[in-house]
Image: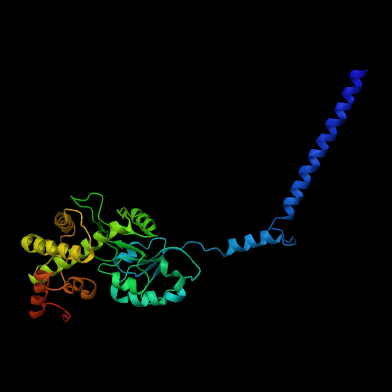
Amino acid sequence: FFFQSRHSTMTMISTAAVASAILAITNLFTSAEAFSPSLPSTKLPSYMAHLSTQTKLSATPETIVIGGGRIGSLISNDAKLLGRNDPIASSIDANGEGPIFIATRNDVLESIVDECPANRRGDLVFLQNGYLDNFLERKGLLSNTQALLYLSVASLGVDPVDGITSVNPEGLTAATGVHALAFADRLASLGLKCNVVSASEYRPAMFEKLIWIATYMLVGTAKDCNSVGQAGSDHTELVQDIISELVSAVGANEGIAFPSGTIERLAAYTDVVTDFPCGVKEFEWRNKYFYDLGDDACPIHNGLLRECAEKGKLGFELP
């Protein structure tokens, strides 16, 4: 009798426990429904409404490419591409986020920066050749992402030639800054290499690319060469003398120590883009840096520039 009575009591307790659990679960789902934003008749608690509003207002990262030329078109896959006739200010979300790659000539940089919403200028990524430091410093953008493009695109839509050389099989293209990895990933999706480097590593690399442009283009123009390859092969000693001169001049002026092998690295890259035509262009962004260092620092470079000017081979007047 005692066993039967205890068993009945335990059965009643178990039944009550199950009922209580079911009731608790029912209340839980009812409470969850009360907080569901999908029910229009239900008012959210203030703190959850705040979170919901924040979620809606948060920007979705968007990649923008400014410039529809050879480089801009190349990297614009899955990006918003702005051409020369597209308004910059109204095309860029002032509250948005994500990299804004500028793939244009240097002479339009001023207007692009000025038209870009002020709070998005930190997202601008500069892909231009040349010496940009003075411009970037004046605009307060010296810490922006920059990239050195060691690749060649002969014409719009043509497959690019990567700057992979016998000396640098890892490639020479480099980027630094907050959006450097995003740029490297974009190039990687195209089968192109890009090294993400620190600002201190980038600086000598930037000057080395500047030296390549200033030297091979100048020698090719002065000696009536059809390409940078011809300039390098037919006038090797002159090319090497100017490179050595400019490396020393930059080192003294900037306090930069270049990694050994500059001449070999630049010659190997020239072999990759051997058919690239010569021409002294965008003087204020390229050769002018060295010209302004003076004849004591850059006698061969500056003398050759003046020789080109005297023979009418430059499309501009020297200062």
Considering depth in this image, is 292 or 3 the residue closer to the camera?
Answer: 292
The answer to whether residue 151 shows anywhere in this view is no
Q: Where is residue 5 in the image (x, y as percent from the top left)?
A: 92, 22
| Colour scheme shown | rainbow
Q: Position of residue 69 (x, y in %)?
A: 31, 69
For residue 63, above or below residue 302: above
**Residue displayed at 78% across by 47% down:** 27
**Residue displayed at 81% across by 35% down:** 18
The answer to whether residue 179 shows anywhere in this view is yes
Considering depth in this image, is 211 or 111 the residue closer to the camera?
Answer: 211
**Residue displayed at 75% across by 47% down:** 28
Count of numbered badges drawn on the protein: 0
Q: For residue 309, which quarter of the picture?
A: bottom left
For residue 316, above or below residue 226: below
Q: Quadrant of the C terminus?
A: bottom left
Residue 141 in the figure: left or right of residue 93: left
Q: Quadrant of the N terminus?
A: top right
Q: Position of residue 240 (x, y in %)?
A: 10, 60
For residue 33, above or below residue 213: above
Q: For residue 179, which quarter of the picture?
A: bottom left
Residue ranking furthest to the right: 1
Q: Where is residue 308 in the image (x, y as percent from the top left)?
A: 10, 76
